Image (spheres, rainbow, N blue to C red):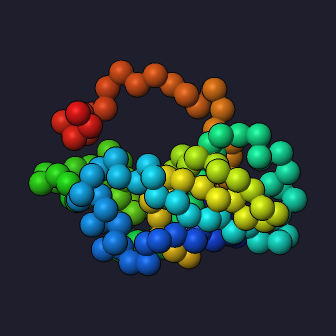
Amino acid sequence: MKIIFKPIGIVHSPYSQKKDIKKSQNIDPKGFETVRGELEIFGEFAEGLQDIDGYSHIILIFAFHKAGEKKLYAHPPFDDRRRGVFSTRSPNRPNPIGLSILRLIKRDKNKLQVQGVDMLDGTPILDIKPYTPRDQKPLARFGWLEEWLD
């Protein structure tokens, strides 16, 4: 089975290279919360942004367009142990798809100003969904990340 996606826009981010993101993560694993960027939605999809302004947060689904070799293990930048790729946010995965929850600051026509950016400049956007109460689940455990979130 072959699945093909057409990007609906691109991310404008302060991160131009993978090493910039890794440097931010090494400093603080929660360090992306204040990073601002812009989502530029292509004209043919701009009408789909109608009513998005009413949400405080959005779910961004994107392609890791500069991912490396597909792997089943990852070495998180702030951890010295090898972890299963599905327990990490590594871009080097069987299907290089990313997901981030971003704070929506404002919309200006086909552009969304957002906060919480953790992707590279030029990242292809695959979809946007509103972050709703249905998405807000209380978390009981944080797996191997618990030691880093204290």
Residue 68, can we see it?
Answer: yes
Q: Which quadrant is the C terminus positioned in?
A: top left
Answer with the quarter of the image where residue 21 lies.
Answer: bottom left
Q: Is residue 139 above or below residue 77?
A: above
Residue 109 rendering spot, x and y as whole percentages:
82, 63
Residue 2 rendering spot, x and y as whole percentages:
61, 66
Residue 135 rendering spot, x and y as whole percentages:
58, 31
Residue 97 rendering spot, x and y as whole percentages:
51, 59
**Number of marks in the image?**
0
Residue at the limit of the structure toward the left, as seen here? 80
Q: Is residue 52 above or below residue 20?
A: above
Question: Depth check: 120 or 86 in front?
Answer: 120
Residue 2, can we see it?
Answer: no
Residue at x 69%, y 68% (from the top left corner): 40
Residue at x 39%, y 63% (from the top left corner): 91
Answer with the quarter of the image where residue 107 lies.
Answer: bottom right
Q: Which quadrant is the N terminus positioned in?
A: bottom right
Left or right of 6? Residue 82 is: left
Q: Is residue 41 above or below residue 104?
A: below
Residue at x 26%, y 37% (from the top left corner): 149
Question: Depth check: 107 or 94 in front?
Answer: 107
Residue at x 70%, y 53% (from the top left corner): 106
